[in-house]
Image (cartoon, helix red, strand yellow):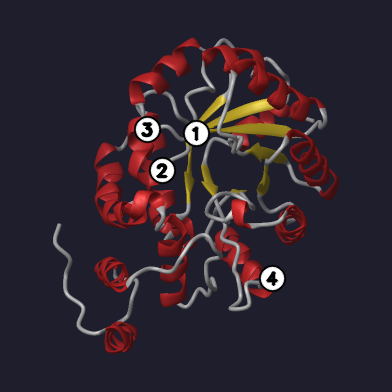
Amino acid sequence: MDYVDLAKRLCTVHAINVTPFRDDRGIDYALLEQNVEFLIASGLEVIVPCGNTGEFHSLSVEEAKTVTRFVVEKVGDRATVLAGIGHDLQTAREMATFAQDVGADAVMVHQPAHPYLMAEGLVRYYTEIARSIEIGIALYVRHEAVGQGVLDRVTALDNVLAIKYAINDLPRFGNLVQSVENRVVWVCGTAEMWAPFFFAIGAEGFTSGLVNIAPELSLTMLKGLKEVNQELVWDVWRDVYPLERLRAKHSNGNNVAVIKEGMNLLGLPAGRVREPLGELDEADRRELIWILKKWGQLEEETTSRVKGRLGRTREPSQ
């Protein structure tokens, strides 16, 4: 495998597709196909099934495998597929091997969901996964236990190509970029709201759930970041900030619900969220409607119908 070429392909927007659920909580694969086709038609070059916007932690292992295989088959050679894997070591290795067997280009290893993390254990965890496959690996870092000592050792493995960094501690991130010994692609893991700051100190890509609603905004920001066009970057940032702030409410509990409700409002059906997530409350839904209307995404006729269902919609306070 050409790891150099694959690493270059990861220097872009990582589109985290949703996993649409029906009212009976089953996966709606027809809607999933529509979502994937929308992303590819919009120009996204990296598709990430089973990411956090895809509600990875609400999926069974078998469901996650099925979603990965489905997305790989639908994408074909039109984009790079970076499949989310995780859980305990045995399961993570099993999921990584499965992703490789069905044709994924790389896997994204979710932050281990364990209350106790130690450097030596993390090194063994990542190393065992990396050695079980030949395709590329991106580490999804959300915990400070994954520090330079861990990253120096794990990024020495040939197929560990990227670090999706999702801790909004910019001095710490900058120090890691400057200090980690091995060349990897650094990806801002906290989307458009933080991407300009991470790019300023070494990021070369960023993740996005926004792409499911407004891919043109994400791709315009990427263009501005790569061309160092600050005016373009901050024009987009000002547009996306209200939505990303809304997603961050309730300790990020709104993260997926905002995206799915936005898709549903725009005629890009995404179904419902699955527990332990919940739907947007009325006030947050009103704010989302206001944002989409401000972007020009939501037509007046549709807005009027939604207003009638929810009651009077007013511009939220800033």
At x 63% / y 77%, what residue is drawn? 24
Secondary structure found at label 1: loop
Sequence-wise first label, 4 or 1: 4
| Distance (Cα) linking label 4 and label 1 | 29 Å
Residue under label 3, please give it: 168
| Distance (Cα) linking label 3 and label 4 | 34 Å
Tell me residue 264's x, y (percent): 46, 75
At x 60% / y 17%, what residue is drawn? 119
Residue under label 1, please give it: 142
Say which mark, if any, is on residue 29.
4
Sequence-wise first label, 4 or 2: 4
Sequence-wise first label, 1 or 3: 1
| Distance (Cα) linking label 1 and label 3 | 9 Å
Sequence-wise first label, 3 or 2: 3
Secondary structure found at label 4: helix
Residue 165 vertical placement versus 234 (above, below): above
Near mark 3 (Cα within 10 A), the count class, few <14, some 14-19 or many ≥20, is some
| Distance (Cα) linking label 2 and label 1 | 26 Å
